């Protein structure tokens, strides 16, 4: 028996009239009568004494109606509370993203977001593995990839671009690179994760249709972009890093784009940062608030390019 059946019993019991009950539920009286009969058959007892002139409750019907009305009140209260909670801008917001993205992008934005929404608490789950959002009860994820699959609502945050960076001192030691192929003679810092092979893919910005691979044989391999950046900042070698990860270091002159004429990628050139959440019919306003905030703040990354004065000059 579903909640609609209980509600129909309650209405008939309150009105003691099939015609009046039928008007309320927008059905014809014969359909209401048939549904009541089906409910009584399911219960194995009569709820009403019915004839052509009147409807009265049986003793079982009186007792059953009391329980039914209690259940209906609790059900309506639960629905009301759920709707209220969904529309209240508060509660805990669980967010997952890569460790580097969390450190570089999300953490600096936290004070502003929390100030805008004082009733929201934030639980960050940095991970370089894709967490199952439904299983872990995660509200929002940011993923850096070519495309995202799964039963999610997905929004493109900004396209991701990679460049090869090194310190000015390192570039003085090895000289200006006139071609990406020179990387094979150097000691690049290697990103060691599944899907990231021993070759970097390049294309000239002036002729993007001409892609080519360069073999990379570095002595240092790490599985963390943040650590790659730190090692590069120590002058240990060039590293292929996302522009959003190094923009402050480039602006400060600590890192230089040593191959500014080329686009580079570990996988494919059409990667992006994606924001996603589980595909539910009702989205809590705290999720909507965070997505709107992050999309607004992320606009500065949309057209990011390394400034000319920070590019390779020897």
Image (tube, helix red, strand yellow):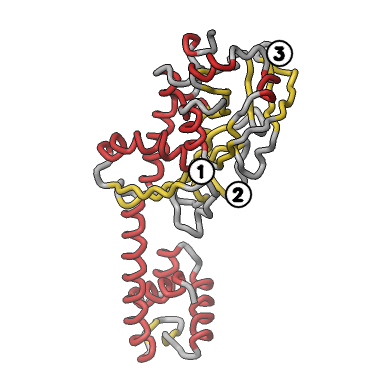
Label 3 vs label 2, nearer the camera:
3
**Residue receiving disc 2:** 150
Asked if residue 300 is positioned above or below residue 223 in the image, the reply reads above
Q: Earlier in the sequence, mark 1 or mark 3?
A: 3
Of helix, strand and loop, which one carries label 1? strand
Residue 300 % position (x, y): 43, 23
Q: Residue at x 46, y 26 (%)?
A: 246
Asked if residue 222 is positioned above or below residue 88 in the image, the reply reads above
Asked whether disc 1 touches disc 3, contact meaning CB atoms under 8 Å apart, the reply is no
Residue 24 % position (x, y): 40, 64
Q: Quadrant of residue 145?
A: top right
What is the distance, in whole Å, between disc 2 and disc 1 at their CAs? 10 Å
Residue 76 visible, this angle: yes
Residue 299 % position (x, y): 44, 25
Of helix, strand and loop, which one carries label 2? loop
| Left or right: 224 as drawn, with respect to 211 | left
| Left or right: 71 as drawn, with respect to 168 | left
Q: Residue at x 53, y 14 (%)?
A: 172
What is the distance, in whole Å, between disc 3 and disc 2 at their CAs? 35 Å
Numbered circle sitting on residue 276: 1
- Label tally: 3
Q: Earlier in the sequence, mark 3 or mark 2?
A: 2
282 vs 290, nearest the viewer = 290
Residue 161 visible, this angle: no
Asked whether disc 2 touches disc 1, contact meaning CB atoms under 8 Å apart, the reply is yes
**Residue receiving disc 3:** 207
Numbered circle sitting on residue 167: none
Q: Residue at x 40, y 50 (%)?
A: 94
Asked if residue 249 is positioned above or below residue 8 in the image, the reply reads above
What is the distance, in whole Å, between disc 1 and disc 3 at their CAs? 34 Å
Q: Residue at x 66, y 34 (%)?
A: 267
| Quarter occupied by the C terminus | top right
């Amino acid at each position: 028996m579903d909640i609609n059946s209980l509600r129909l019993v309650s209405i008939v019991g309150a009105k003691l009239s099939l015609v009046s009950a039928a008007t309320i539920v927008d059905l014809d009286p014969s359909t209401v009568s048939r549904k009541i009969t089906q409910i009584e058959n399911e219960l194995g007892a009569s709820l009403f004494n019915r004839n052509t002139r009147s409807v009265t409750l049986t003793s079982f019907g009186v007792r059953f109606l009391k329980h039914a009305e209690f259940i209906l009140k609790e059900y309506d209260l639960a629905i009301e509370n759920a709707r209220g909670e969904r529309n209240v801008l508060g509660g805990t917001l669980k967010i997952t993203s890569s460790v580097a993205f969390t450190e570089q992008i999300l953490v600096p934005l936290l004070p502003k977001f929390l100030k805008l929404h004082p009733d929201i608490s934030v639980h960050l789950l940095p991970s370089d593995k894709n967490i199952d959002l439904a299983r872990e009860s995660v509200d929002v994820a940011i993923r850096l990839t070519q495309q995202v699959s799964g039963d999610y609502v997905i929004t493109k945050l900004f396209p991701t671009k990679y460049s090869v960076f090194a310190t000015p001192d390192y570039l003085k030691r090895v000289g200006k690179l006139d071609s990406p192929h020179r990387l094979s003679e150097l000691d690049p810092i290697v990103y060691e994760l599944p899907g990231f092979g021993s070759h970097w893919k390049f294309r000239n910005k002036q002729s993007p249709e001409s892609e080519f691979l360069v073999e990379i044989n570095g002595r240092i391999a790490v599985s963390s972009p943040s650590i790659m950046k730190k090692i590069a900042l120590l002058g240990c070698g060039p590293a292929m890093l996302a522009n959003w990860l190094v923009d402050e270091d480039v602006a400060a002159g600590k890192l230089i784009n040593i191959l500014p004429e080329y686009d580079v990628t570990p996988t494919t050139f059409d990667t992006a940062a994606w924001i996603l959440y589980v595909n539910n019919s009702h989205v809590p306003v705290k999720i909507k608030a965070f997505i709107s905030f992050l999309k607004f703040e992320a606009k500065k990354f949309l057209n990011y390019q390394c400034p000319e004065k920070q590019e390779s000059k020897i």
